[in-house]
Amino acid sequence: MSKKNLNVRWLYLTAGVLALLFAGIIYGWSILKAPLAADFGWTADQLALNFTLTMCFFCLGGMAGGLLWELAYPGGFGGQVFYLALAGMAALIGIAFFYAICKSRPAVDFKNSMDGFLRYFQAERFYWLYPALWYLEFALVFGFLWKMPGAAWYKTAALILVLFPTLNLIRVNSLFYMNINQINNGSGVTGYISWESFYSEDLMQRLEDAIGKEMSSYRVAHLGISPAPALMHGFYTVDGYSNNYPLAYKHRFRQVIAGELARNEEARVYFDCWGSRCYLFNSVTGTYWMLRKDSGVQYEDLAFDLDALKALGCQYLFSGAQIADAEEMGLTFSGYFDTEDSYWGIWLYELAR
């Protein structure tokens, strides 16, 4: 093997690693979209268009690179594999355009004019295929490169190197790994939340007993904690996470937290630009809703409109932290509740009538 050929192969390897690193920028969009919306005042439609354009030009760049390669090596090393990879790129671009169409104003207006299945079905979620398609595309491209001249060990080493980020992701964020880790070590070591600890059925039962009324006769809200355990137990809540509730209800709920949203721009953008989660966002814990017992957090001077909250039918507040000035707000403290195995510690407050 000549020194010249070896240098060229290292160049290919370096270029491939750099390309994958730049590809990772796309996945940083979930972190960037909130500050972009805050700084530029972009709506959800504008954010979606920006991401769609990014994906389209990313895919078009890959196709252009493949075509240039084919021009440089006519008939080259790929054959059928090359055209399969080209088709994969076309599919990725098609999904991006389909997502853009589904999020366009005419399509959204049409969906909102419908009832039932057509209104709530999210066809654009074909983008869930993106991770699998990108890995398939990677396999096809690597199969194309595998046919290039060179030692098998060199190609195997290159494959391991470019897949290393994925292997590390499996190690730190794989559900399989997390389950094995939890079984072996328990929550005390892993920090994971078990099903029993999250839903805390015994704790929910203690809260039901403390209130002592038929659950259908009152409504509850949550501060700093998820409404899911209460809903699972059978409580009726004024807050929740849903994609099919009336927009008018969101507007009514916003009146409750308007004062706090004015103090926390990140929470305002989250609530106003993404509609599915109606929680008591605030200036102390922001959009966080997983306060564990003994968190040390304390609420004070919350600018909630409790009259608007009562107008939604709410009579009780389950808080993940103590409210220091609860009495001044018009809340009556009814007790603190937790259990040995519960993730939550809940301060129970009753809204003044």
Image: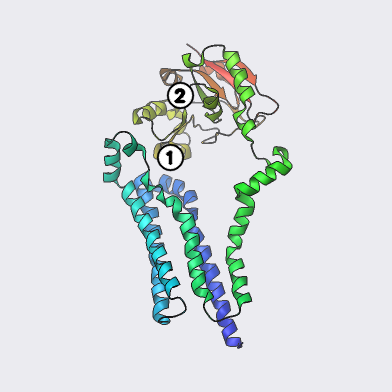
- x, y (%) of residue 80? 42, 73
- x, y (%) of residue 174? 60, 50
Q: In the figure, 290 relative to 315: above or below? A: below
Q: In the figure, 11 relative to 342: above or below? A: below
Q: Residue at label 2?
A: 238
Q: Residues within 10 Å of mark 2 (few under 14, many from 20)?
A: many
Amino acid type of the residue tagged 2 in the rendering: Val
Does residue 98 appear anywhere in the picture? yes
User: Distance between the Cα atoms at labels 1 and 2?
Assistant: 21 Å
Left or right: where does residue 287 sit relative to residue 201?
A: left
Q: Residue drawn 40% across and 40% down?
A: 273
Q: Which of the 4 quarters of the picture holds residue 294?
A: top right
Marker count (numbered):
2
Q: Secondary structure at mark 2?
A: loop
Q: Which of the 4 quarters of the picture holds residue 339?
A: top right
Q: Residue at label 1?
A: 269
Q: Residue drawn 37% across and 29% down?
A: 251
